[in-house]
């Protein structure tokens, strides 16, 4: 069974991968919507890493608003329920 550290490390590695791909998209001639998708995925993975770190169950969702609301209960200093973050949800995969 994976430890908490393994799970957090996995979320962070996935977030780094998404950020690298977003940077590659921005530095290219597009498509830029793909870069937005990777930004959304990176934020999602980073939130899930913090939730995992605090021992909070990780929801199976791409909705950054829902995740930011849960995050605020375990780490209030990370105020991610801001318009520029929440707009990224529209770039996510629809379940």
Image (cartoon, rainbow, N blue to C red):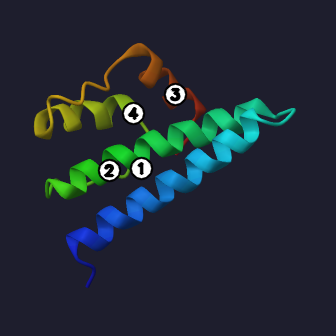
Q: How far apart are marks 2 and 1 (CA)?
A: 5 Å
Judge whether residue 35 can be spotted in this image.
yes
Going from the N terminus, do you reach mark 1 or mark 4 first? 1
Q: Is residue 85 left or right of residue 8?
A: right
Going from the N terminus, do you reach mark 2 or mark 4 first? 2
Residue wearing tag 1: 45
Contact flag, marks 1 and 3 (Cβ < 8 Å): no
Q: Distance between the residues labelled 2 and 3?
A: 16 Å
Q: How far apart are marks 1 and 4 (CA)?
A: 10 Å
Residue wearing tag 3: 88
Contact flag, marks 2 and 3 (Cβ < 8 Å): no
Q: How far apart are marks 2 and 4 (CA)?
A: 10 Å
Q: How crowded is mark 2: few (under 14 residues within 10 Å), some or many (20 or more)?
A: many
Residue wearing tag 2: 48
Q: Distance between the residues labelled 3 and 4?
A: 7 Å
Which numbered circle lies on residue 84?
Answer: none
Q: Is residue 39 left or right of residue 54?
A: right
In front of the other: 55 or 66: 55
Going from the N terminus, do you reach mark 3 or mark 4 first? 4
Contact flag, marks 2 and 1 (Cβ < 8 Å): yes
Q: Residue furthest bottom?
A: 1
Q: What element carries label 4?
A: helix
Q: Residues within 10 Å of mark 4 (few under 14, many from 20)?
A: many
* Residue in the image at 21% along x and 69% along y: 4
Which numbered circle lies on residue 64?
Answer: 4
């Amino acid at each position: 069974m994976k430890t908490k550290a393994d799970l957090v490390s996995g979320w962070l590695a996935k977030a780094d991968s998404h950020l690298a791909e977003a940077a590659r998209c921005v530095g290219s001639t597009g498509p830029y919507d793909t870069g937005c998708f990777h930004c959304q995925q990176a934020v999602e993975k980073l939130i899930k890493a913090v939730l995992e770190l605090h021992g909070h169950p990780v929801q199976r969702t791409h909705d950054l608003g829902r995740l930011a609301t849960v995050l605020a209960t375990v780490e209030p200093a990370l105020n991610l329920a801001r318009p520029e973050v929440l707009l990224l949800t529209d770039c996510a995969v629809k379940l």
